[in-house]
Image (tube, rainbow, N blue to C red):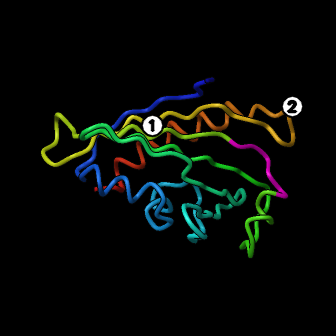
């Protein structure tokens, strides 16, 4: 496992609310950089369209232990910039993929809140291998965690 970045925040929402928000296009658009639109696909997949391209987000694993939950999503970022009509349009233009592990547990500082520890890991470059894509993910991740805290109130 290659960890790119880990961010922690507490937000005033329950663990079950945050669990749902992780794959809710409307909630993701609130903190995503330069958001345009998003849509749920079949099952546990959705896409988010940003000014820089479309990302496919797929929930790949959920582990529950008592009041703690770990949700893993795979993000496939593409260079496709139009509104996609199929999952293949995104994957055919894939730039990179990586995983996000969302560790959720009741907050110790906010009543009825959730502590989120979000880990970005295991980047795989599909195109433009010479670009510092890991660095770009880290810079975006640092902004994500702060913006998430601001908008998920």
The stretch drawn in magenta includes residue 93: yes
Find residue 150 and report its horizontal and vertical position in percent: 34, 51
Find residue 35 and report its horizontal and vertical position in percent: 57, 63
Pick the residue in front: 145 or 19.
Answer: 19
Residue, disc 1: 118
Identify the residue at horizontal 56%, vertical 66% (top origin): 43
Residue, disc 2: 130
Q: Judging from the image, what secondary structure is the residue with disc 2 in?
A: loop
Find residue 48 and report its horizontal and vertical position in percent: 61, 63
When asked about the image quadrant of residue 21, the answer is bottom left
Q: How packed is label 2: few (under 14 Cα within 10 Å), some, or many (20 or more)?
A: few
Task: Considering the whole magenta stretch, tell me its main secondary structure.
Answer: strand
The mark that comes first in sequence, 1 or 2, is 1
> Compared with residue 9, is residue 50 higher up or lower down, i.e. above or below?
below
Asked whether, in this view, residue 85 is left or right of residue 15, the answer is right
> Compared with residue 17, is residue 43 higher up or lower down, i.e. above or below?
below
When asked about the image quadrant of residue 36, the answer is bottom right
Q: Judging from the image, what secondary structure is the residue with disc 1 in?
A: strand
Pick the residue in front: 116 or 53.
Answer: 116
The stretch drawn in magenta includes residue 63: no
Which residues are drawn in magenta? 92-97
- Distance of label 1 from label 2 (alpha carbons): 26 Å
Identify the residue at horizontal 76%, vertical 71% (top origin): 82
Identify the residue at horizontal 63%, vertical 23% (top origin): 2
Identify the residue at horizontal 25%, vertical 53% (top origin): 13
Q: Quadrant of the C terminus?
A: bottom left
């Amino acid at each position: 496992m290659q960890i790119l970045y880990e961010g922690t925040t507490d937000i005033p929402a329950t663990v079950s609310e945050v669990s749902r928000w992780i794959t809710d296009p409307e909630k993701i658009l609130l903190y995503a950089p330069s958001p345009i639109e998003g849509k749920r696909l079949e099952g546990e997949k959705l896409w988010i369209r940003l000014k820089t391209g479309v990302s496919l987000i797929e929930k790949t694993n959920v582990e529950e232990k008592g009041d703690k939950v770990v949700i893993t999503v795979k993000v496939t970022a593409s260079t496709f910039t139009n509104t996609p009509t199929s999952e293949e349009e995104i994957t055919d233009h894939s730039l990179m993929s990586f995983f996000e592990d969302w560790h959720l547990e009741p907050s110790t500082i906010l009543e009825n809140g959730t502590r989120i520890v979000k880990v970005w890991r295991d980047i795989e470059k599909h195109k433009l291998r010479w670009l510092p894509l890991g660095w770009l993910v880290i810079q975006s991740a640092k902004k994500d965690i702060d913006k998430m805290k601001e908008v998920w109130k």
